[in-house]
Amino acid sequence: MLFHFFEIYDSFQRDFGSLEKMQESMSASTIAVQGSGWGWLGYCPKRKILKITTCPNQDPLESTTGLIPLFGIDVWEHAYYLQYKNVRPDYVKAIWKIANWKNVSERFAKAQQK
């Protein structure tokens, strides 16, 4: 398990410069979603890189972009309104405190096998 974390961490370094820069980029993209949708960290099996993208509404990631989902941030209002009201940036900032990196690492390891 720890090996997989180091592997994805190396990919954060390669594809974004650092874990923190990936988080900043994904946060900015996700906050900018107009209306409802999702921010995604995905793996591109063709190019063997990590990418950040967004999908409006409930549009699926893999069939519309070819990316394999590793981590998603739901920005439909039901995901954050009760706790964060209409302050989406606070919700997105807080999501990183509970991100399950073990799960993301496992998904990354499986995605690389495709």
Image: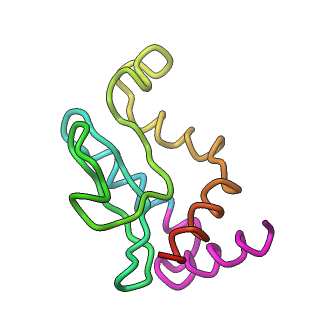
Residue extending farthest top: 82
Query: Measured along the vertical axis of the image, is residue 74 above or below residue 102?
Result: above
Q: Quadrant of residue 34?
A: top left
Q: Residue at x 35, y 66 (%)?
A: 67
Q: Quadrant of residue 47?
A: bottom left
In the image, 106: left or right of 51? right
In the image, 83: left or right of 85? right
Q: Residue at x 64, y 64 (%)?
A: 105
Residue extending farthest right: 2
Magenta region includes residue 20: yes
Task: Between residue 84 and residue 9, name the one nearer to us.
Answer: 9
Q: Quadrant of residue 89?
A: top left
Query: Measured along the vertical axis of the image, is residue 59 above or below residue 67?
Result: above
In the image, 106: left or right of 56? right
Magenta region includes residue 63: no
Query: Residue 108 location, x and y as percent?
Result: 57, 67
Query: Residue 111 location, x and y as percent?
Result: 51, 69
Query: Residue 33 location, x and y as percent?
Result: 25, 44
Query: Residue 20 location, x and y as percent?
Result: 57, 65
Query: Measured along the vertical axis of the image, is residue 35 above or below residue 67?
Result: above
Task: Between residue 113 and residue 52, name the one nearer to us.
Answer: 113
Q: Which residues are magenta?
A: 1-22
Quadrant of the rendering where the N terminus is positioned: bottom right
Q: Residue at x 38, y 75 (%)?
A: 44
In the image, 75: left or right of 59? right
Q: How is the protein colored in the picture?
A: rainbow
- The overriding secondary structure of the stretch rendered in magenta is helix
- Count of numbered labels shown in the rendering: 0
